Image (tube, rainbow, N blue to C red):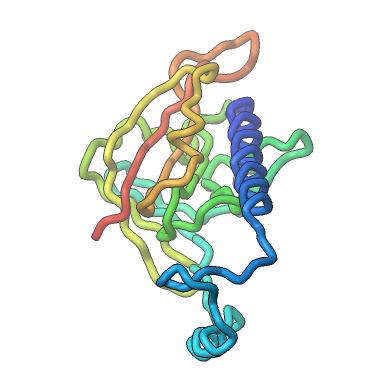
């Protein structure tokens, strides 16, 4: 897989975060915040509100994903933790097991949380098929299971499988926030460009958390 599309995703995500911070700073004020009735908040009201405050210190975050199973295409793989490469692009699975293992983009959403969790895998190598070789065969209704570090599992249902030219990678649909827990599986596909040494397209599976 190549990662040109990933640079677009990282840049776009950075713009979203920067815009959010700017707007929050612009709206800051030293005046008391209004109460529900529109009147300035009082000290007593603040004390009452503080009594119900719960510290985030005891908050348990969603466990990280460690395994991916897709019965329909015979995939059962551990998950590498992926970051960004030296160019700021999203990494692809690497190391001795890179062809047999998929990887989760750890700077993004954790499977089961609100948003789009992204898992990447190679389609093949010079030695033969890789972990996501049959990804293009997934159809609506197929089951995807992600097992997490605490032993819990979340199940996703495939909504659709699409193929896009890499020059028109759907960054928004893959990386941008969603209001529901979703999953994106990404690999290479289409025709192989022997001169460039990579495939010309990406195969992407879109899935939603099963109730």
Is residue 203 shown to the viewer in this render? yes
Residue 187: x and y in percent read: 48, 33
Horizontally, residue 58 falls left or right of residue 158, namely right
Is 27 situated above or below 13? below
Placement of the N terminus among the 4 image quadrants: top right
Q: Which residue is drawn at the image coordinates 61% and 82% (left, top)? A: 57
Q: Residue furthest right?
A: 86
Residue 182: x and y in percent read: 38, 49
Is 211 situated above or below 195? below
Residue 193: x and y in percent read: 56, 11
Q: Which residue is drawn at the image coordinates 42% and 72% (left, top)? A: 36
Q: Residue furthest front?
A: 39
Horizontally, residue 3 falls left or right of residue 160, namely right
Closer-to-camera residue (189/101): 189
Residue 121: x and y in percent read: 51, 39
Q: Determine which quarter of the picture holds residue 18.
A: top right
Closer-to-camera residue (58/6): 58
Is residue 95 shown to the viewer in this render? no
Q: Which residue is drawn at the image coordinates 50% and 61% (left, top)? A: 65
Horizontally, residue 161 falls left or right of residue 22, namely left
Total tally of numbered discs in the picture: 0
Placement of the C terminus among the 4 image quadrants: bottom left
Q: Residue furthest left?
A: 141
Q: Determine which quarter of the picture holds residue 87.
A: top right
Closer-to-camera residue (56/203): 56
């Amino acid at each position: 897989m190549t990662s040109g599309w990933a640079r677009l995703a990282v840049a776009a995500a950075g713009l979203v975060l920067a815009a959010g911070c700017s707007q929050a700073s612009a709206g800051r004020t030293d005046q008391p915040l209004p109460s529900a009735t529109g009147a300035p908040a009082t000290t007593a009201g603040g004390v009452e509100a503080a009594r119900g405050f719960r510290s985030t210190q005891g908050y348990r975050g969603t466990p990280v994903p460690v395994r991916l199973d897709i019965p329909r295409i015979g995939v059962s793989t551990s998950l590498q933790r992926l970051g960004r490469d030296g160019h700021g692009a999203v990494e692809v699975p690497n190391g001795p097991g890179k062809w047999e293992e998929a990887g989760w983009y750890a700077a993004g959403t954790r499977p089961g949380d609100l948003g789009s969790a992204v898992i990447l895998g190679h389609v093949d190598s010079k030695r033969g098929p890789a972990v996501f070789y049959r990804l293009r065969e997934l159809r609506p209704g197929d089951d995807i299971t992600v097992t997490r570090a605490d032993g819990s599992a979340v199940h996703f249902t495939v909504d659709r499988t699409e193929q896009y030219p890499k020059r028109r990678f759907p960054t928004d649909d893959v990386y941008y926030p969603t209001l529901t827990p979703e999953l994106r599986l990404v690999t290479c596909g289409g025709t192989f460009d022997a001169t460039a040494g990579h495939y010309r397209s990406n195969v992407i599976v879109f899935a939603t958390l099963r109730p």
